[in-house]
Image: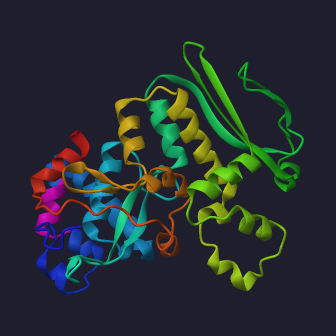
Amino acid sequence: MPVNNQLIPQQEQKRKVGFSEVINSIPYQRMIANTLKDRATANRFISSIVSAVATSPALQECTPKTVVSAALLGEGLKLSPSPQLGQFYMVPFKQKEKTDRNGNVIQQACTNATFVLGYKGYIQLATRSGEYKRINAMPIKEGELISYNPFDDEIELEYIQNDELREGLPTIGYYAMFEYHNGFKKVMYWSKDKMLAHADKYSPAFSAQAFKNIEEGKISERDMWKYSSFWYKDFDGMACKTMLRQLISKWGLMSIDMQKAFDADGGIIGDNGEVTFSDSEREGADEAPATEIIEAEIAEETPEPTPEPQEQASADDFAHLING
């Protein structure tokens, strides 16, 4: 990102300052006010974003502008950054220093925050659109799948009512569905093997073989720090998000807000609201957490994004983040 961006206060570039100090500086206050317009909304936004950053050491390392930009997009979509609600996340993403052929630094090393739509964010936006009567995604346990016919779009399941028994059973696959108010219904089922292959292909931080080794107890506890991806930590939760993303993108109706969130998922929100990511990151949105914020170690394993355009930005530019 531009090293000399005029939105970054001079004191922020010279010394390490707290996020609450930065966000209360005049340039950031002007940026937020120009975007949100209403003073009460702006004050609530500042309070919530300061709280979110205070509870995440990883976000404290991010460039404040990218944190605020991602949060403003979430605010415009009426989604909460609270990890407990799981609607959207600001995920740390480390960028290495870039130099030209002569060794001149053209981009300093930094950590940026990416906007990541959560599992519950998909459901929230779909429900709010008014098109969906029902929408759901969940893991399927051993003994629950009776039959699945993708040609006729029919699935027969028998839910195990005993929660304690169900939790102890192995997951064999994943189910997602939606139904419109007009009666149109779509269901999708992936086996766990198919989901493993998907994660192995599209998540640079995940290995299906390593995951199987962990399940079989072949990885010692002292070596688990090497496996920081949330595909290792919460495979079922990650899989549910992937199912919803696949289902809605292929067959679902998208409101303007849902399309905006879908297009920005996994990207860095830059000047004028443009979103920056590489092709691998587009599918890398599946690398987002299902229930909590990704910590710093996962940012180290994410593929490097395309640099943002080297141009100046004014505070007024950020009014376009929400309004298009």
Is residue 314 positioned above or below 120 on the image?
below
Q: Residue 61 sits in which quadrant?
A: bottom left
Q: Residue furthest front?
A: 101
Was residue 240 drawn as part of the magenta stretch in this picture? no
- Closest to the observer, 115 or 209: 209
Is residue 254 positioned above or below 119 on the image?
above
- Closest to the observer, 113 or 52: 113
Quadrant containing the C terminus is top left
Residue 221 falls left or right of residue 100: right
Q: Residue 89: give x, y in percent of width and height.
A: 44, 57
Was residue 25 drawn as part of the magenta stretch in this picture? yes
Quadrant containing the N terminus is bottom left
Name the residue located 64 percent from the left edge and 58 percent from the top edge: 200
Q: Residue 301: give x, y in percent of width and height.
A: 51, 71
Q: Residue 201: give x, y in percent of width and height.
A: 61, 55
What colouring style does the render use? Answer: rainbow
Q: Main secondary structure of the magenta part?
A: helix
- Total marks placed: 0
- Is residue 290 in sight in this rendering? no
Is residue 97 positioned above or below 50 on the image?
below
- Closest to the observer, 273 or 31: 273
Residue 127 falls left or right of residue 222: left
Q: What span is in magenta?
A: 24-32
- Closest to the observer, 45 or 252: 252
Name the residue located 10 percent from the left edge and 52 percent from the top edge: 316
Residue 26 falls left or right of residue 296: left
Name the residue located 14 percent from the left edge and 66 percent from the top edge: 7
- Is residue 211 in sight in this rendering? yes
Q: Residue 309 sits in which quadrant?
A: bottom left
Q: Residue 262: give x, y in percent of width and height.
A: 42, 42
